[in-house]
Image (cartoon, coloured by chain):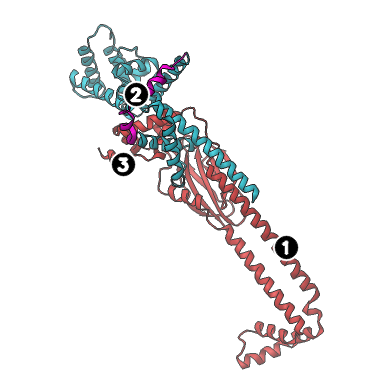
Chain colours: A cyan, B red
Amino acid sequence: MQYSNQSHTKVQEEFFNTLKELVSKTVMRYIARGIIPRREQEDVETAIIEKFLIKREKIESSFQGKAKITTYYIAVINRMCAEVIRKEQKHWYTINDQIDNHYHQQATVSFDTAKQTLVTEELLRFRASLMLFNGIRYKVILFLKYYFDIPLTDSDIKNYAGDKTEDARKILSERAKLSKAEVNEKLATLVSIIEKKEIKGDAVRMWINKQMDTILCRMNGRNNSFHCKETIGLMLEMQNV
Amino acid sequence: MQYKTQHLNPEQIARVADAINSGTYDQIPENMRNHLLECDDCASEVINVTELSFNTRNISYPFKDKIVTTQQKNVKKINSKTIIGFAAAATIISFAILFNIPWNDSETVQSIKETPKVAKSTEQNNIDSTPQIAEEKQIKKNQSPLQKNTTKKTEKQTKKTNQSQDNKLLAYYKPNPNIEKLYENMQGNYRGESIEVTTLPEIKYTKGTKIEWKNPDKHTLYVELFDNSGEKIKEITTNDTSYHIPMLQPGLYYWKLINENYDLLFVGKIIVK
């Protein structure tokens, strides 16, 4: 009995430490993206841990084993964090931000490393957001790359054009000399060959804008100032998609 | 637009995030992928979880299971107590048999010889319906008070032993609530894009019984066998389409089919009689 009690306590301790680690990681990401003020970190973490422990039994009984348990816990914690943000955001930004400025002034040399980590993490998010385009993923990648004048690879063209890769390559050649309007016209021609749809350049322009808005909406979440159309181009260039 | 109505739950979000991180997004059910194409809220959540779970060390295994393991240890302790009790009862019975063997008693032997007559008379009187009962009654009549007491004790002990044996047997068939929940959840659900289990969810074990599934792409799969206490008793890795169930003690067993990304594809029951 004593053995089982000791073992139970150990398991609980281990669980609590892991929970704290996961909550902290989640909250830190929202802080890094400017959604949660740094001064609120401890309060938000405590609120999430409390919520999680209250609902723990329900959370664990809902788990069906279709995902990794760690990822499942992260998904639950992330949802709880979003709830806290929704509730508290109004209060956070009505207070004078003097305290937060203090944190910004403390930035040191380690800032560069943090920046690098942030970039890597944003690239990961970008990759995930492209993946969610499902069937039109390759079309989105090709059209955005062409739009931002990023060199195309063979697989970029082949993934969209299939057996009409050669025709597509001819249409998409000499990108540098083209104006935005001409780019749209070229892409409209490409659509008519590959998808057999007669559309105009303006329709392509609207379609590209819509896809960029979707990416921005999904990547920014509640912080609309974090990414813009230019950063999509930068991220496309930085990662080998 | 139809996909907008039902948002993904945290486990589905986690599942998609795992698939993106492992490069198997295409294996996610189509309805979920279509929903993510249209729903910015769920997509945003997936993006967050994908990023957060990337490179996060895995928890050794559900903490809940560890607690179950502790419970299992308690169950084992109870079992050992039952075994000790069982052994003690057996010793007492053997002692009782050694010192009060009725066929060593000349009176009893004689009475046994006389039983057909007695049985006949009892049949005539319509008191006892079977010769066996009549025999028993006659033996009891011929026994001394001391012998009667010992016989009663022996009967009681035998009853107790039978009861504990029955309880023990019943315990082997007691469903495991945790695995049962998984079993129920898996019925009629998605079982993987290319892997489809052809064996019935519940099967009765006979020698040579095997569990089967379709695996056209020869994916690596894990088959795990559990007893009804939730303890894993066998685990194999295969890219075959079937698995021969080994010889098992009577009881209720469960089996799980897991793919190489550790996605649970199927949970089935095996009843061994």
**Label 1 vs 3, first from the N-terminus:** 3
Residue A95 belongs to the span the image colors magenta: yes
Q: Position of residue B73 (x, y in %)?
A: 63, 50
Under mark 2, the amino acid is: Asp
Rendered view: A93 above or below B135: above
The chain carrying label 3 is B
Left or right: where does residue B273 sit relative to residue A54? Answer: right
Residue nearest the observer in this picture, A107 or A115: A107
> Mark 3–mark 2 contact, CB under 8 Å?
no
Please name the residue shown 33% across and 12% down the image.
A150
Q: Are marks 1 and 3 in contact (CB under 8 Å)?
A: no
Can the viewer see residue A141?
Answer: yes
Q: Which residues are magenta?
A: A86-108
Residue under label 1, please give it.
Answer: B87
Q: Which residue is mark 2?
A: A97
**Residue indicated by mark 3:** B6
Q: Quadrant of residue A48?
A: top left
Amino acid type assigned to the residue bearing label 3 in the image: Gln
Q: Residues within 10 Å of mark 3 (few under 14, many from 20)?
A: few
Which circle marks residue A73 in the picture? none
- Residue A229 image offset from top left, x and y in percent: 29, 18
| Label 2, residues with CA under 10 Å away: few <14, some 14-19, many ≥20 | few
Q: Nearer the viewer, residue A114 or B24?
A: A114
Q: Chain of mark 2?
A: A
The x and y percentages for residue B42 are 34, 35
Q: Residue at x 22, y 16 (%)?
A: A184
